[in-house]
Image (cartoon, grey):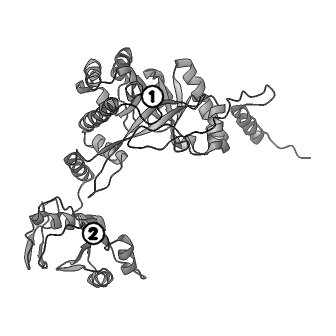
Amino acid sequence: MIAPLRVGRSTSVEGAVGTDGVEGRWNVRFFDQQRRREEERLLWSRDVSFANRLALLVPGARVLDLEAGSVVIAPSSVLTDAAASEAAHGPHPPEYGLVTVDGSLPERDRYVVALSAAVQLSGLAERIGMAQTTQVIQTKVLDYFFSLKNTHDVHFQPIVDLATGELAEYECLFRPVMPMLPQSISAIVRAAIDTDRSVELDSYIVGRVLERGAHLAATGNPPGGAPARVVRFAVNLAPASLLDPAFEASALAATVRAAAIEPRRVTLECTEQQAVPDVVPLKRQVKALRKLGFGFAIDDAGAGYASFALIAALRPSVIKIDREIVSRIARDDAKQALVEAFVSFGRRIGARLLAEGIEKRADLAMLTGLGVDLGQGFLLGKPAPELRQPRQVVMPPRAVPATDEPSPTARLATRRTAARRPVTPG
């Protein structure tokens, strides 16, 4: 464990690095510290000359000499990645770790916490057998995430009916705000799944989303749009959460109604980052939720665990096509054939198709022509902290292929047949 650091002119730190019993004694000479309002960063490197070069480039930098390397501390505005790269330039650039000092920690702790993070980031700790396990790191990331509960935000991205260009619903996109350790929501979800804390995470996120939804319903209309109380919202959940008693269908419906939102205005999106070992209990839960009015979507179809078999078993109301399939689909026959298959499949089970990540007009035209019902992406509207109307984009007509024009699937099959056909010598 990291021992508390008492800041002064000369300080000895016992066990300053390491999480598995490895201890060392570093004599750390700190300059007198004064309380600073400006955010600070800390860099650690074994290369003392590199640290001194960097200190000469950075106004107001403080160099702290250690028995194993040096530390540079300076305001974040000047101790930048660019400054470190400039000082490190050479045929054999030194390894270093550069992190932000968490000013919310007690002064006796903040520099040792930052020092430990910088050593880990440099890669030294792993080489000398002191690296934290992935699970330990993920647990610390989640602990930090939950310690900042009041800072995280929710953004709303419009989902558009491709036949009319009108707003269909908003996806609620959770935005972690972690100044000391920036993380994407995907990284947070992955950490929660790997540490068996997905239910804890989803319970918090759903509560936060409903809180925002209730506020929007109380404050009235979004600019140029329908009242928030009649707008649909899509919320992401991990499969494990849907199977937990905390998300039992009637209890979840009561929680949603308590936020002044009707279940029929909520679509629950099952994320694809987690495998489903037994689909039968999940199938029962989805059926119960649908019976109470909730919509249900399979996210990222065509990637991860969102297979045709899983989709067929769960019978969702919406199938979301993964953005990797959507990107550049206008020039990719194989992607077009896959979307055609999803459209046909969706029609058979009564599900609407939603294409994620639409950014190009050519892709929008292709998706509309293939019969995709809904669209989402920067071309149609970016996520925002308030409810905004979709961008005014002229929707291409739903083209019906002429009888003498083969579909993308037929064209692909023709090319494959031609490629396999043996060439007869002339």
Q: Which residue is mark 2?
A: 124
Residue sitting at x 57%, y 20%: 347
Which amino acid, by three-letter code, is at mark 1?
Ala
Up the image or down, 327 lies above or below 402; here it is below
Check the image and name the residue furthest to the right: 426
Relative image position of residue 197 (x, y in whole percent): 24, 39
Classify 5 as above or below 318: below
Q: Give the image location of residue 419, x and y in percent.
A: 75, 42
Give the quadrant of residue 238.
top left
Residue 20 shown left or right of residue 162 in the figure: left
Judged from the image, the secondary structure of the residue bearing numbered disc 1 is: loop
Label 1 crowd bin: few (<14), some (14–19), many (20+), radius 10 Å = some
Q: Position of residue 296 (x, y in %)?
A: 41, 25
Q: Which residue is mark 1?
A: 226
Between residues 381 and 328, which one lies in front from this camera angle?
381
Residue at position x 50%, y 28% in the image = 308
